[in-house]
Amino acid sequence: MPELPDIELYLAALRKRVTDRAFSEFKFYNPFALRTVAPKPADLLGKPIRDVFRLGKRIAFELEGGACIVVHLMIAGRFRWLAPTAKVQMKITHASWRLDDGILVLTEVSSKKRAGVWLFASRSDAAGQDPGGLDPLSASPEAFSEALLAENRTIKRALTNPKRFSGIGNAYSDEILHAARLSPLKLTKSLSADEVERLRLATRDTLNLWAAKLLDEFKGGDKFPGPGDVTAFRPDFAAHGKFGQPCPVCGRPIQRIRYAENETNYCAECQNEGRILADRALSRLLKDDWPRSFSDEES
């Protein structure tokens, strides 16, 4: 799922292409992609786009007069920018918006069609799509601590709860926790004040670092990211997607916890005093043979 740094990249690329311009055509190729009944897509044609902004992990376009188009990419949804004469791949496309020099399309290469589009008459109506999580880039120490400690959850779950923090998902939470040197399964209310502040700074700095990296790679949005460019797996991540590879800090192998469709990656040495956290999928199989530390694993 695109997370805050990815969304910021999309915002930069979209603003350069659609600000103060109007869509001349708005088409749906999947009837289930449109999640609202009013206003109608035709009602939004010809109205200049005045703002492109973020609502959590959603991207919103505000048109002249206040109407908004809100897009949630979910797991596999992606924007693509096509030449005006390009043929739209209807099999993977949910919607398209045409301008005079290009076509913006919403695609989803997945058997589970989760991405969607919502249309609203006003920005205040669209604001209801925001889960209400704190902006981690600008949160004060007090606000961050309050959001984090509102419930006694694992840090991983707290960071990825959109009602607590905006724009953080599975990938960047792994990177944040590695930078903060904290176990993903540590409970929030067991954190010391120093650990909370360390987590706040790691959250802010990690997200800012990656937003800046992506903007630099795509020339501030001049280059539109392709479908494979917005990904949860980046070569220079420290932990996420790096199971079995050496930690860039200590050299120990990165570990994993698998659950449902997700995998959490962490360094046992840097984040959990050398103790390996139980992987539910493997621990059920191995039972007492499941390693609890590096010494057990290496014996």
Image (cartoon, rainbow, N blue to C red):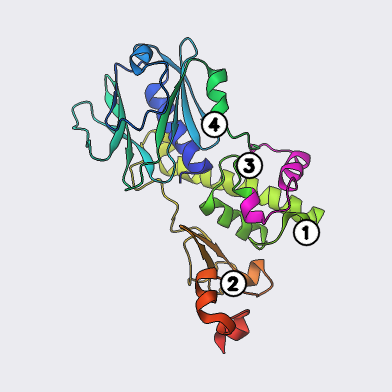
Disc on the earlier residue, 1 or 2: 1
Discs 4, 2 touching: Cβ within 8 Å: no
**What residue is at 40 percent from the left and 34 percent from the top?**
116
Q: Nearer the viewer, mark 4 or mark 2?
A: 2
Read off the residue under disc 2. 278
Q: CA distance from mark 1 to mark 4?
A: 31 Å
Discs 1, 3 touching: Cβ within 8 Å: no
Say which element carries label 2. loop
Read off the residue under disc 4. 55
Q: Is residue 181 above or below residue 54?
A: below
**Does residue 24 show up magenta in the picture?**
no
Disc on the earlier residue, 4 or 2: 4
**What residue is at 78 percent from the left and 40 percent from the top?**
142
Mark 1 residue type = Ser
Q: CA distance from mark 4 to mark 2?
A: 35 Å
Read off the residue under disc 1. 190
Q: Position of residue 80 (x, y in %)?
A: 32, 36
| Residue toward you, 52 or 117 | 117
Q: CA distance from mark 1 to mark 3?
A: 19 Å
Mark 2 residue type = Ala
Read off the residue under disc 3. 165
Crowd tier of the residue under label 2, counting other residues whose Cα lies within 10 Å: few below 14, some 14–19, many 20 or above = some
What are the residue bounds of the magenta stretch?
A: 135-158
Q: Position of residue 242 (x, y in %)?
A: 48, 65
Discs 3, 2 touching: Cβ within 8 Å: no
Disc on the earlier residue, 3 or 2: 3
Name the side, left or right, on which 39 lies relative to 263: left
Q: CA distance from mark 3 to mark 2?
A: 26 Å
